[in-house]
Amino acid sequence: MALLPVADALRLLLDSAAPGETETVPLAEAAERVLAEPLKALRTQPPFDASAMDGYAVRAADVADVPVQLEIIGAAPAGRRFAGEVGPGQAVRIFTGAPMPEGADTIVIQENTSSVGEHGIEVTETVAGGRHIRRKGLDFAEGDLLLEAGRVLDAAALSLAASANHATLRVVKRPLVAIIATGDELLPPGSEPGPDQIIASNAFGVAAIAQSAGARALDLGIAPDRKEAISALVRQAKDARADVIVTLGGASVGDHDFIHDVLTGEGVVLDFWKIAMRPGKPLMFGRLGGTRCLGLPGNPVASLVCSHLFLKPLLAHLGGRPHQPDIRRASLAAALPANDTRQDYIRAVVEPTPDGLLATPFGIQDSSMLKIFAEANALIVREPFAAAVDIGAPCDVLMLR
Ligand SMILES: Nc1nc2c(c(=O)[nH]1)N[C@H]1C(S)=C(S)[C@@H](COP(=O)(O)OP(=O)(O)OC[C@H]3O[C@@H](n4cnc5c(N)ncnc54)[C@H](O)[C@@H]3O)O[C@H]1N2
Ligand code: MOO
């Protein structure tokens, strides 16, 4: 049977994947969350004409000719306005952020004054009317639209929401990803493996990728290669109301590869199984009601490459986040042979040179090899049936970091 092209698999996977439920969170917990509804200002900022400088609130007409002496009739620190009115020949000591007193129409900064006795100043520089005054509503007015729905709440957005007097924000719920490892040979890190056992590694990288896409990861541990044991964890994932269930391993066709049977047995309707990609050929995707199920191949590099290419955009869509793979042009530092039927993702180091990016592929690309994956910062992407190419040929690279 012909393998499904990567682009078709991605289309099926993202079909109808849209942001789901929303929740209200305190502002202090809203960083990097996705705003679920447009945000309007609950107040006007500044709520009054305010001084932008430390100095004196005066009448511009009084300081048209300098030097001139003025009488200080009071003070206006930030948070406490001067109650009276500034008359001719008078000034009010004022500080940045304080409301402008009645009668004054400009600010003389204190550097342009000197003290005269206990209650007077001499103004040494003239200043035009309206200087150093922040007008009421300069930043925003009550009712203004401040942030669009879908905005990822970065530093400026959070401070703006706070300034507009929102103590909580309505955000898109972070999708929950339940991760199930499978395999009799697997033990968690920190164990003492027997002679035929290895350490389970995939869940950690997959969880990290899920979290980088704004999701929560729930590691349900390792099921042995028994259908009932795997089914039990799939049900546990359902009970936890996972939006996405990810299984690791058992996706291929061996005698101990049960994921296909378990998922379909649990009622999963498969959208696809096996795609034209290396690594990652046995990738499986289906739906169990509203829950999406992604069966990742067990080989560690296949698990992670499939997570970058499929799980990440799926979670971004479900969480209402933008997702744009970072694909760039580079030239090859090594010749590559002709490609076969599968789209190839080749671990490589991409580095800048005066002539542009240079991509150096690792020589051996077995999909069990994590060390070179950790050294790689990119994947060279080769189309199915791509012709053999020489050193220096252009190529596409998917940047990973
Ligand atoms: N006859 C065929 N055999 C295989 C095919 C095929 O098309 N026909 N495909 C190969 C490809 S491609 C891959 S990828 C693997 C994936 O198979 P599975 O998804 O069934 O994975 P497993 O057999 O369970 O494990 C493969 C390998 O990865 C190790 N593994 C599994 N889970 C983890 C984990 N959580 N952490 C670390 N390592 C893990 C496992 O021990 C195996 O060494 O199938 C090929 N075979
Ligand atoms: O996914 Mo397998 O790792 O293509 O070899």
Image: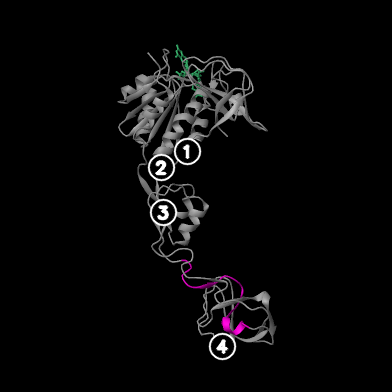
Distance between mark 4 and mark 3 Cα atoms = 48 Å
Q: Quick one: label 3 or label 1, which is nearer the N terminus?
A: 3
Residue at the disc numbered 1: 213
Task: Tell me which corner region of the image, top left, top right, bottom left or bottom right, holds residue 250.
Answer: top left
| Residue 343 shown left or right of residue 360 in the figure | left
Q: Quick one: label 2 or label 3, which is nearer the N terminus?
A: 3
Question: Given the image, on which type of amino acid does mark 4 rest?
Answer: Pro
Question: Given the image, on which type of amino acid does mark 1 rest?
Answer: Ala
Residue at the disc numbered 4: 88
Tell me which residue sits at (54%, 85%) in the image.
86
Residue at the disc numbered 3: 169
Distance between mark 1 and mark 2 Cα atoms = 10 Å
| Disc 1 packing (10 Å; few <14; some 14–19; many ≥20) | many
Contact? badges 2 and 3 (CB < 8 Å): no
| Disc 3 packing (10 Å; few <14; some 14–19; many ≥20) | many
Q: Residue 168 got which mark? A: none
Q: Quick one: label 2 or label 4, which is nearer the N terminus?
A: 4
Q: Report the span colored magenta.
A: 45-64
Residue at the disc numbered 2: 320
Task: Tell me which corner region of the image, top left, top right, bottom left or bottom right, holds residue 311.
Answer: top left
Residue 107 vs 22, above or below: the answer is below
